[in-house]
Each structure stands twice: as structure tokens, then as C-alpha cells.
Amino acid sequence: MSTAASAKNGTWRNWGGNVTARPAREVTPASVDELAAAVRKAAEDGLRVKAVGTGHSFTSIAATDGVVIRPQLLTGIRNIDRDAMTVTVEAGTPLKRLNMALAREGLSLTNMGDIMEQTVSGATSTGTHGTGRESGSIAAQIRGLELVTADGSVLSCSEKENPEVFAAARIGLGALGIVTAITFAVEPIFLLTAREEPMSFDKVTSTFDELWAENEHFEFYWFPHTGSTNTKRNNRSAGPEKPVPQLQGWFEDEFLSNGVFQVAQWVGRAAPGTIPSIARISSKALSARTYTDIPYKVFTSPRRVRFVEMEYAVPREAVVETLRELKAVVDRSGLRVSFPVEVRTAPADDITLSTASGRDSAYIAVHMVKGTPYQAYFTAAERIFTAHEGRPHWGKVHTRDAEYFDGVYPRFGEFTALRDRLDPDRRFQNDYLRRVLGA
């Protein structure tokens, strides 16, 4: 099974398996002109339009009963500008291909998320991010964008050209137009040393500020029903390169993190009472390790166990209190949670609807394995996150609406006004956008 979303008998299904749609038709344009023509034709036929990448969003942000645009022919690097240190890439290019192509050119993005199956446009449009003290989301590294707007015209934007569109369209939710190309800032390739080690929940929360301040990229996973976490610190290194040996890498990243973990999920689904015991064993399975490699080999890891996810950004100074509240709820609730909780950070940025817009942020992600009931856990978690003015990831499960977002995003009205201008007839609307942006 591929990691992309699947389409059978005209039904589109996302990666997590929790969203389906039946579009009226599918278009796979081979050029920007063909894509623009498809948007104009949809307007003539009175159909709405959505572009869909690999379906890694757990919300119905890409679902439509109108025209689905598949961008898999709009891939590859258009241009590398070594003077400006930028790369311009077609919207349908998977992050994996971009990372590998850049590495061959001796270049790299500054920061990235931990999954690289998504297309560049899907990842940036929903605000995909990694963890970083000074370096932000993938969208925060964008220097220019090209998009097809509702009337079928092609619009370019950057800090100098159409700056008000640039401020919003870097994380545009598919609401402002269909992204056809992205220009990213890049830098000469560098090495990162990763230090992974277990640490108690109490220690990681009591020293969180120091761990964040001392490391360029800090994150950790807490295993519910235990007092254990696994921490990861990534920092730039002068070398030498010292990758994880192939057999050890397979054993830890494939066998333990995916294979054994998958079996543990099956057991947990069949017998929920075993989950706390499995969690205790899982939290001890991964031992400490240190390795040095090029960025994408350190930042990203394979994710073969399918899951459903909710993630909220809270103000960074509220993360420890939020986590302790989450732990207390899990401990006393009778919930059985077999998937670790992931915690990352990002600096404030200037993108209108970025989850880190205008504030230093910390991300708390809760997961449940695909096919298990997640509503009770996610509802309990969301209650805690929203009490801290949390902002949900646009591509992950949440129940918030436009009224809520107007309260937690100071520039929310700026985005909706721009949408009124660029898409007055709501060509790019769907049920999800109607809920989160208002009608």
C-alpha cells in the first residue's frame, strides 16, 4: 500500500482512512495553463475545485464533490538560484524528492517536519512543521509563490510582489487559489548530530525551558500510562558524518518503531486492557543513541503505522502546564492510549494563519491508531488545548469554527477579506473551509 491517499470506484480516501469524498471528476494537469483551464471549466460547469496531494491531512480540507486537481505531473525543480540561495519547485513535488534533489546539489532546507511523503503545496498549505528554536515551519521558509486564482489567472507573490497575498497564501488552506509553484530559501547542506535518549516525564517538564534554550531542535515523545519520555536533540555539527549503521537503523527505525509498534497496536486494539503494560515496554524499547547525518536523514523518519491525529499549538510558556493537565486526564480517565504524545516548538512567524503567527509556540500532538475510537480522547485533549487558546493544526482533527479562530488569530479578518477578494464566488470552498473560515 502506498503512503498516498487512495481512490477506488471514484471515491477518494485520505491516508488516515477517516475522510472520504466522491468528486464529480478528476483532472491531472501537465502544466499551469492546463490547471488554469480546468479551473475556468469548473466555473462554467458550476463546480467547486480542490487540489489534493497525498491525503496526509486528517481533516476534510481537501475533500470535494466537485473537481479534484491531482498535481502529480506538476513536479520537479524549476530553478535553483545560488546567488539568492533559493529553489523554485513545482507544487506537486513530494518533499522526499525535493530533499533528495537538494542534497545532490549540496543544498538543504533549514528545517522540516518528520514525514516527507507530502507534496510541497499540501505540506505548506496546511502549516506542516518540525521543531525549532529559531527556525520555523516549512511555510516560513517560502520566499515566493505562484497560484491560479478563481478566475483562472496566474498570480505571483512574494514580499515585494502582491505582499498582502504572500502574507496569507503561504498557509492558504487551499482557500485563496491553487498553488502551482513555490520558491523556498535554501542553504548549503550541513550536518546535524541527533542525540536521542529516554528521560522521565517529570524531568523533561521541569527542565523544558533549558532543554529548549540549549538545543536548535528539541522534541520529545511521552508514552501515556507511564512516566517515561523519549527525547531528541538535533544540533548542527562540524562532523564527521556518522550515520546510524544500516542494520541498527533497520532494527530501530523499521523493526521496533514500525514493525513491533504495529503489532503492539494490533494487540492493544484487540485487548485494550493490555495497553498500559505495552506502553511501559514500548517506552523502554528504544535505547539512547547518537548519530550525525545530513538534515533530511535526521529530521525525517518513516511512518508505516497508520493513525489519526490531533495537534494544537499553545503559547510556548503554557506547554508544561498543558501537558501536565493532559497527563492527569489520561491517568484518571480510564482512557487507553497506545500512541505516544509528541511535543515540538516553533518561533513566532508573520504568516496570517500560521499556528505560530505572532507568538512563540509549542505543539502537542495526540494520536490514535487507525480504526480505534479516538473521539473520547481527542475531546478531552481538545478541551485542555482550547483552554490555553490553542490553535489546531489545519490538517489534523479538531472541532473549532470561524468564531473560535477569530478569537485566537489576531489577523483572521485580514485572511477572510483577502479570500472575499480572490474567491468571491467560493470556487475553492468545501464544508471544511465553510466551517473554519465562515460562509
Image (cartoon, rainbow, N blue to C red):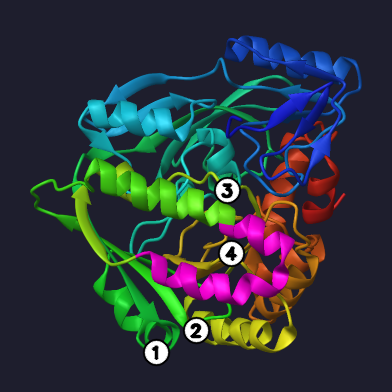
The image shows residue 425 at horizontal and vertical percentages of 85, 33
Q: Which residues are magenta?
A: 264-286
Main SS of the magenta part reads helix
Question: Alpha-carbon distance for marks 1 and 3?
Answer: 31 Å
Residue 260 location (% of width, % of height): 50, 54
Name which of mark 4 and mark 3 comes first in the sequence: 3
Q: Secondary structure at mark 4?
A: loop
Q: Dot 1 surroundings within 10 Å: few (below 14), some, or many (20 or more)?
A: few
Of callouts 4 and 1, the N-terminal one? 1
> Residue beneath label 4, please?
339
Q: Quadrant of the N terminus?
A: top right
Report if the CB atoms under discs 4 and 3 are less than 8 Å apart: no
Q: Which residue is mark 3?
A: 305
Q: At label 1, which amino acid type do we have? A: Ser
Q: Is residue 276 magenta?
A: yes
Q: Residues within 10 Å of mark 2 (few under 14, many from 20)?
A: some
Q: Give percent across and percent down for residue 236.
A: 19, 56
The residue at 43%/54% (across/down) is 256
| Total numbered circles | 4
